[in-house]
Amino acid sequence: MVKDTGVRAPLPPFTDEHADLRASVNRWIGEEISPHVDEWEAAREFPRELYLRAGELGFLGLKYPEALGGQGGDCVHDAVWAEELAAAGASGGVGAGLGAHTGIATPPVFNFGTPEQHERFLRPAIRGEKIGALGITEPGAGSDVAGIRTFARRVSGGYVVNGSKTFITNGVRADFLVCAVKTTEEGGHHGLSFLVLERDMPGYEVSRKLEKMGWHSSDTGELSFTDVEVPAENLLGEENRGFHLIMANFAWERLSMSLAAVGAMRRLIETTVSYALERRAFDRPIGRFQSIRHKVAEMGIKLEASRSLTYQALRLHAAGRNPIREVTMAKLLSQRACLEVADECLQIHGGYGYMREYGIERAVRDARLGPIGGGTDEVMREILGRQMGL
Ligand SMILES: Cc1cc2nc3c(=O)[nH]c(=O)nc-3n(C[C@H](O)[C@H](O)[C@H](O)COP(=O)(O)OP(=O)(O)OC[C@H]3O[C@@H](n4cnc5c(N)ncnc54)[C@H](O)[C@@H]3O)c2cc1C
């Protein structure tokens, strides 16, 4: 039988240039990240210097103009970064910490910020000197983003902010927080705005570093704001147009999570096929059992279906088509698929899969966040149902 491993030359939107980028992200992760992942997971954080190193290599500014210190690429370059961070085994935690910086915190600064804000926040973020976080979720408002209560009262020269945020990736060590606030008493769709809050502002406090099931090497913070004085020049975009900014940001967040799931599944399946060829039971490699082969076949379909939908959404996004429907479908399909694939790979590894050293149990824990973060499965289904006319 002619073997078809699925390896193909790049097809649009990817080119040979993207293939080179894939190779260099992979090389970097293999040489400088993977060997330390266990240590960083145990320490519950990866070193801050990793941002500087990623900045030095150009990975934090792939889609930003050279005039701002970026690489002058576009979202397809960033897509490669998102996928390979997961595929090369950087761990969910490292992927989350670096990915939140490039995928959700800096894009609103670039898209909605003034030239002055670009200089103050984006340029140092691209160099990895300042770490960014995005603060939308609150203890009382997650899926219902319009229900946030953190309030920015208008005063002469700016705002005074009171409230709190929770589950914020990079929240503990972020230098700046792109933060959703209410700027009218009612809040909601027409009363939200974004302010850039800075860590050294009096009244800005990291109230807790949260312990969680997976993503151990990333920090997840709970933040509180007590009479934080924020100058008017830290308003991002237009006042009371923040809901629009949240929605714009969700598109890339969900797409990059889909790309990461595709990368993670690719790695998990490759690792598991190698294991199934080596591990023997009843005088043969376990991969020779039909039940194992069939599990691998099903996983291959989950990967390919997720990849096709995700790349199609990426193509449309890159063409400026605002593909809410395809992005939502890709997010919903790929996150659940990744969790199921990770669990099935653990099963194929048997007891070894349950042990720390193979990294499979970590992959299962890391994958559990997918159907929750960036909008839950239930919320994705709601959006889709409405997009389809109901
Ligand atoms: C590790 C981690 C990192 C995160 N990073 C960030 C970050 O950097 N920045 C940030 O702002 N947020 C972040 N989040 C928050 C994340 O986006 C929210 O957890 C998510 O949006 C869900 O909100 P919630 O947890 O409040 O759940 P809830 O909204 O309370 O939902 C609880 C349950 O009710 C269901 N539900 C809610 N509404 C509906 C509905 N209309 N129909 C049907 N079911 C519904 C949900 O699907 C879910 O099953 C992070 C979360 C985690 C766990």
Image (tube, rainbow, N blue to C red):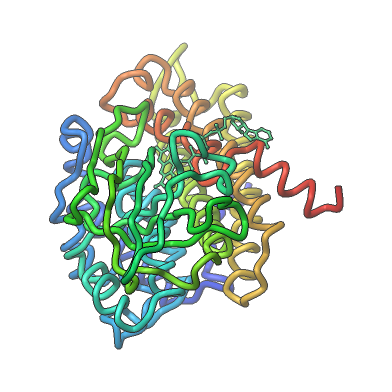
Residue 32 in sight here: yes
- Give the residue at x 46% y 35%: 369
Q: Position of residue 163 (x, y in %)?
A: 37, 43
Establish if 237 lies above or below 347.
below
| Residue 95 falls left or right of residue 333 | left
- Give the residue at x 45% y 76%: 74
Dividing the picture into quadrants, the one containing residue 112 is bottom left
Nearer-the-camera pick, 59 or 221 = 221
Nearer-the-camera pick, 160 or 6 = 160
Question: Outermost residue, right direction?
Answer: 389
Establish if 278 lies above or below 371.
above
- Give the residue at x 20% y 63%: 130
Q: Position of residue 86 (x, y in %)?
A: 39, 49
Q: Position of residue 141 (x, y in %)?
A: 52, 39
Question: Outermost residue, bottom direction?
Answer: 67
Residue 7 in sight here: no
Dividing the picture into quadrants, the one containing residue 42 is top left
